[in-house]
Amino acid sequence: DLYLRGKHLYQSLRPGRIDKAVQYFEKAIELDPSFSAAYVSLADAIWFRAHIRMDDSLPYSFEGSRPESLLRKAIELDPRNAEAHAVIGHQLTYGLHPEAAAREIHQAEAINPNGELVLRYVARYYSDVGWPPEEGTVYARRGLQLDPLNPLAAENVSTAYWGAQQDEAALAAADEAL
């Protein structure tokens, strides 16, 4: 219940709600320290919160950060946690480690090709450093198709089109998401 409440609040894309989501994920971990998915969602929410606030409290480098330790714990608990591998891949992309990012992203996709975070971060990988960048739109649209009420999935479609330099489609997707 706490985990699902956290997911709902996190997907709202509002800073105050993301703060509350972080609290729910932390409480879910307290209640069940073996709940791998809660570690992944907590790590992702912490990074997203820092990103939207342009917060410098998290190091730019993924290595040694709290989100990294949360994700490593999730994989220790469940080595086949595709969502954890996807988030690690995403963070490695931004840490300028494209080869390591590609390994994590492809491992995530091999484990669960339809996972929410897998589709989101495979799309982001192609949009940011993968080739061809248009491939990102395929993953983003599939994510939205599987979860049409998720605002993060809708936003990801616009971002994927933007990464593929399809500006009109990016604007149309953004308008649709709003």
Image (cartoon, rainbow, N blue to C red):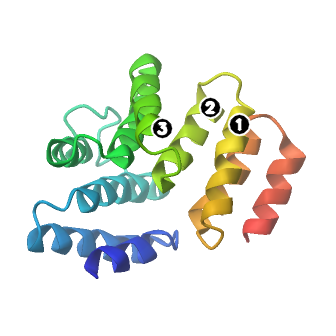
Which element carries disc 2, helix, strand or loop? helix
Which element carries disc 3, helix, strand or loop? helix
Percent position of residue 12, x then y: 52, 74
Q: CA distance from mark 3 to mark 1?
A: 20 Å
Residue 130 visible in the current orientation: yes
Q: Which residue is mark 3?
A: 109
Q: Pick whichever, 172 or 135, lies toward us.
A: 135
Tell me which numbered mark, 1 or 2, is placed earlier along the sequence.
Answer: 2
Q: Residue at x 66, y 49 (%)?
A: 140
Q: Nearer the viewer, mark 3 or mark 1?
A: 3
Percent position of residue 51, x then y: 45, 51
At label 2, the amino acid type is Tyr
Q: Nearer the viewer, mark 1 or mark 2?
A: 2
Q: Are marks 3 and 1 in contact (CB under 8 Å)?
A: no
| Vertical side of 34 occupied by 163: above or below | above
Image label count? 3
Which element carries disc 1, helix, strand or loop? helix
Q: Choose top left, top right, bottom left or bottom right for residue 30.
A: bottom left
Q: CA distance from mark 3 to mark 2?
A: 13 Å
The numbered disc on residue 163 is 1
At label 3, the amino acid type is Glu
Q: Which residue is mark 2?
A: 126
Q: Is residue 146 left or right of residue 64?
A: right
Percent position of residue 8, x then y: 44, 76
Q: Pick whichever, 110 or 162, lies toward us.
A: 110
Q: Nearer the viewer, mark 3 or mark 2?
A: 3
